């Protein structure tokens, strides 16, 4: 947001507004972790490895899932929780039953194989690349995209990043409320078609109109 707004500021703030904001944010998060014990415990548990019970459980599940991916690398085991429940017990470590891979990316790989992973990556790259072009256009030509609409685009990008980050260690997308939010957010970001593409489409339609 600062990168987009800083074009109206002095040359110094155009250059340093975003880095300084990131620095302040980093310092604030560091102080919060150091001063708040519950938050500090949660953060340190990330680096505890198998010493943390939640980490240990996920590591065991991930180990079994990687074996499943190794045996069915291209097409996977098939989509859905039912397929996972039938195959996972053949690979699971004793006492570590699971209903999913506890990682969106591993779940995608084990269900749909390499083909599904490539398709998902292509979807993300094209959507975010289009969003990046729209942001650049919004920054340099404010009259083309109303300022109020750019907040929705920024919020959509932030939501996608947050859900992907969370998805590294959990499969919350199986919940209808969250999966619906994911697809709505993706559609929101994709709806910001770059101006050049939109104008060219309009010209094609006009040329085809008798």
Image: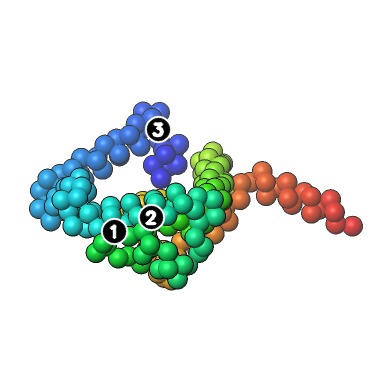
Q: Residue at x 24, y 40 (%)?
A: 26
Closer to the N terminus: mark 1 or mark 3?
Answer: 3
109 or 44: nearer the viewer = 109
Closer to the N terminus: mark 1 or mark 2?
Answer: 2
Q: Nearer the viewer, mark 2 or mark 3?
A: 2
Q: Residues within 10 Å of mark 3 (few under 14, many from 20)?
A: some
144 or 29: nearer the viewer = 29
Closer to the N terminus: mark 2 or mark 3?
Answer: 3
Asked if residue 153 shows in the view, the reply is: no
Q: What residue does disc 1 label?
A: 93
Q: Residues within 10 Å of mark 2 (few under 14, many from 20)?
A: many
The image position of residue 159, as x and y in percent, is: 41, 55
74 or 205: nearer the viewer = 74
Q: Residue at x 63, y 46 (%)?
A: 195
Q: Residue at x 58, y 56 (%)?
A: 191
Which disc, if any, is residue 38? none
* CA–CA distance in space, label 1 to label 3: 54 Å
Q: What residue does disc 3 label?
A: 14
Placement of 68 over or under 133, stated as above or below: below
The image position of residue 170, as x and y in percent, is: 34, 58
Q: Nearer the viewer, mark 1 or mark 3?
A: 1
5 or 100: nearer the viewer = 100
* CA–CA distance in space, label 2 to label 3: 47 Å
Which disc, if any, is residue 65? 2
């Amino acid at each position: 947001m600062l990168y987009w707004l800083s074009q109206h500021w002095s040359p110094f703030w155009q250059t340093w507004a975003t880095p300084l904001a990131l620095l302040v944010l980093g310092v604030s998060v560091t102080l919060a972790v150091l001063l708040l014990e519950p938050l500090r415990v949660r953060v340190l548990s990330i680096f505890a490895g198998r010493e943390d019970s939640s980490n240990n459980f996920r590591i065991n599940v991930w180990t079994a899932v990687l074996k499943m991916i190794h045996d069915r690398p291209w097409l996977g085991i098939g989509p859905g929780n039912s397929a996972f429940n039938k195959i996972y017990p053949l690979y699971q470590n004793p006492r570590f039953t699971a209903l999913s891979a506890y990682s969106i990316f591993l779940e995608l790989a084990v269900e749909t194989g390499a083909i599904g992973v490539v398709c998902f990556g292509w979807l993300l790259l094209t959507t975010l690349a289009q969003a990046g072009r729209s942001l650049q256009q919004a920054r340099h030509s404010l009259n083309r995209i109303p300022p109020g609409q750019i907040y929705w685009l920024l919020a959509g990008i932030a939501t996608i990043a947050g859900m992907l980050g969370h998805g590294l260690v959990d499969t919350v997308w199986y919940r209808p409320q969250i999966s619906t939010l994911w697809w709505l957010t993706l559609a929101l970001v994709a709806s910001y078609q770059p101006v050049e593409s939109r104008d060219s489409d309009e010209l094609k339609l006009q040329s085809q109109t008798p």
